[in-house]
Amino acid sequence: MKPEGDHTANWLTCPDNRAAVGFFGRFSSRVDSIGLLCDRELDLSLPTISSVTVDPTSVVGGTVVRGSVRLSRRSPNAGTEVSLAISGTFLGYLPVARLVIPQGEQSASFDINTLPVPVPSTMFVTATSPGSQAQNANLTIVPPTIDSIVFNPATVTGGTPVVATIRLNGHSPGGAFSRAVSNNSPQVALVPANFSVAFPIASYPYAQPLTINTEPTASDRNVTLTAGSYSRTFQVLAPRIQTFTVTPQILTPGQTATGAVTLTGRAPVGGGSATTLQMSMVNTASANTAVATVAGMANVTGDTAVNFPITAANVQAPACTLITTTFNNQARAYVGVAPSQAALVISGPPVVTFPYLGSGTVSLRNMQPSRQTYTLTSSNPGFVLSSTSVSVPALGNASFTVTLQSDSCSMVTATSPSGARQSVLVIAGPANIGG
């Protein structure tokens, strides 16, 4: 015991290990001294080990565990020496095999370094001291398990590989150590429904990469890998239209253009079912078959691109139409048909795109040696022209404004006094529409 209020003094003990049987003190207005009453007989017995404990009692091999030895009473003046031992050198080792519990202390701690194991195993920790019966504690050591699967990338189009990094929650014991994994979609992710991942001896983070090849699929699929109670999912997408172009976009009656579709990945090979067959086609639709027609379907089984013909109708006046392609998503392009095109009347590109509900400027160039007045027309009433005619100086330029009031297209035509005309395909919508 210590004197009251003294936090630095040594413990008060009876000499020669005599037992303390009481205490005495002197005081007037306050206690100014205190002492121990000691037994007359010597207590020459040594304290015994009352318990050995480990915390935690179950760990993954490779973890450091804290052990503790407790005596039946405080250690005497010379201290108490404790010997430590473990069973099974393949399970772990003790950094210190001898422990001295100092005078006045009743317990002391020590470390146990465990080793990776391929199967659950039990280690027995033993503490002995002179005159004391040995005490034991059990420590369960378990093999590592998969606690992390990271996919890179986590979303792919079928046919693109995915790297799965599979990680353990502890050191691998090496050898033939492996962990079982299940796959819910072996037809899409080309690893077996049940397989094993081998983990050689490695330092942190105890991870093993696995490349998973994927197959083209007719619909979006979620692939889940499961190891024990742990699971993670990545997504395999069906291919979609990446680009859709039409060349050329302005045709003369009866002329054929080429519609070209590229996909984000290979289209799946049809298995004969209606769903697979439909997903292996590019469905094309012409909004106005009086302007242009398409075949309706084009087979892209196993391919990443397909071309199909677009044929201009025998129109009498300039007109345009929308061509739509569908393959898990939709893409659009516009086509214009004009009975005749005179060169170098409308300057600039033959196809222009302006924002919907906005306006844009179209430029004219007069190639004649005298001033010319051109008549202006629009095939779509929703595309309003700033004037029905424009006068252009000899070998000069002029412009007019088109206001777009509908999300569509129009063939805007300039006709010269001699009847020569040229049309430009004006499109209202996003900048990437129009082919």
Image (cartoon, rainbow, N blue to C red):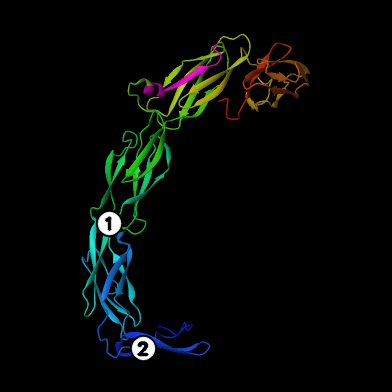
Above or below for 130 versus 426? below
**Residue at the image point whose x is 32% and y is 33% from the top:** 187
**Residue at the image point whose x is 72% and y is 14% from the top:** 416
Horizontal side of 223 relative to 41 (left or right) equals right
Q: Mark 1 packing: few (<14 Cα in 10 Å), some, or many (20+)?
A: many
Above or below for 368 versus 28? above
Q: Is mark 1 on a helix, strand or loop?
A: strand
Please tell me how many numbered marks the rendered image carries.
Answer: 2
At label 2, which amino acid type do we have?
Leu
Horizontal side of 198 relative to 406 (left or right) equals left
Q: Where is residue 38 in the image (x, y as percent from the top left)?
A: 33, 88
Magenta span includes 227: no
Whether residue 349 is visible here, answered yes or no, is: no
Q: Where is residue 414 in the image (x, y as percent from the top left)?
A: 70, 17
Whether residue 332 is visible here, answered yes or no, is: yes
Q: What stretch is highlighted in magenta?
A: 275-289
Q: Is mark 2 on a helix, strand or loop?
A: strand
Quarter of the picture holding the C terminus: top right
Magenta span includes 278: yes
User: Which residue, given by chain and number where applicable, does mark 2 sit on?
Assistant: 37
Q: Which of marks 2 and 1 is in front?
A: 2
- In which quarter of the view is residue 264 placed? top left
**Viewer-side residue, 220 vs 430:** 220
- In which quarter of the view is residue 218 placed? top left
Distance (Cα) linking label 2 and label 1: 53 Å
